[in-house]
Amino acid sequence: MEHANFLPIEIAAALIALAALILYPAGMYISGKKHKKWPFHRFILWSAGVVLAASALTGPLAQLSHTNFTAHMMGHLLVGMLAPLLLVFGRPMTLLMRTLNVRSAKKLSRLLNSRHISFITNPLVAATLNIGGLFLIYMTGLFTMMHMSAWLYALIHLHVFLAGYLFTISLIYIDITTHRYSYMYRALVLILALGFHKVLSKLIYAAPPEGIPKDAGESGALLMYYGGDVIDVGLIIILCWQWYRARSPKMQKTAGPT
């Protein structure tokens, strides 16, 4: 397989990550002038998410992932699952709302309440975009094509990241959430998504994408299967904890504003 030149993508990913690491503390400073001090641990979680997401597109892991399927799958877990989970706990939308003036905040609020946002934040839609996109990548020729086109490679990884983030915020309500769905509905969608993720892992194990040796495909599929389990356990615990808190009168009384 003849690979494209990914250097421009690596540079762009590094610059975007650097901007994210600079803008967030700038937002903390602006927010702190108008509201109470923004918790520092959220910056740590945000930074960890940014660095992990960037590592899948720039640096040693990204370069290795072009020729090593297990490294590619590690990048997939980081950019599509772990990084979104950490970024959500940074509460970027809440911080953004606190830094904007009233007029801009109202415009953003109207956007978040729009039908389009309501549609894509429906857990079932978000799960379809997330898991369905993965099936297209690994069960069609997209996996081979993206390594021959730098722009397709960037577009697919952008989709994996955004779909993973959307899936996360549609299931656990940590940041600002304008359209809420029941715990039962979200739990059922999560179970379905986990099931399809496991099915995809087994399909890759049985028949790796074109150009991937059988043993490399098996290693990558095992990492996808068990590595995904570790991150999914985190999602399950958070959703169950929020569900328990919402149903417990004692917890509702003691839970203060965040």
Image (spheres, grey):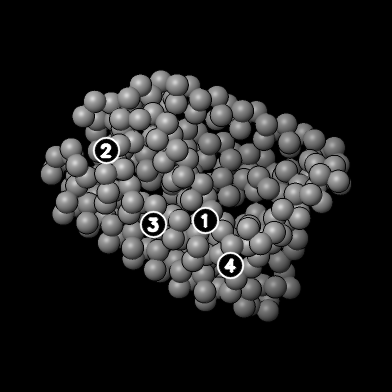
| Residue 124 drawn at (x, y percent) | 49, 66
Q: Mark 2 or mark 3: name the one nearer the start of the chain.
A: 3
Return the residue at label 1.
Answer: 168
Q: Is residue 184 visible?
A: yes
In this picture, is 53 found above or below 105?
Answer: above
Say which label, 4 or 3, has the lower sequence index.
Answer: 3
Q: Are marks 4 and 3 in contact (CB under 8 Å)?
A: no
What residue does disc 2 label?
A: 144
Q: CA distance from mark 3 to mark 1?
A: 15 Å
Residue at 52% over, 76% down = 184
- Between circles 2 and 1, the one closer to the viewer is 2
Few, some or many C-alpha atoms within 10 Å of disc 1 (few <14, some 14-19, many ≥20)? many
- Residue that label 3 marks: 132
Q: Which of labels 2 and 4 is toward the front?
A: 2
Amino acid residing under circle 1: Thr
- Helix or strand or loop: what does disc 2 sit on? helix
Would you say the residues marked 2 and 1 are in contact, meaning their CB atoms lie under 8 Å apart?
no
Which labelled disc corresponds to residue 242? 4
Mark 1 vs 4, N-terminal side: 1
Quadrant the C terminus occupies: bottom right
Q: CA distance from mark 4 to mark 3?
A: 27 Å
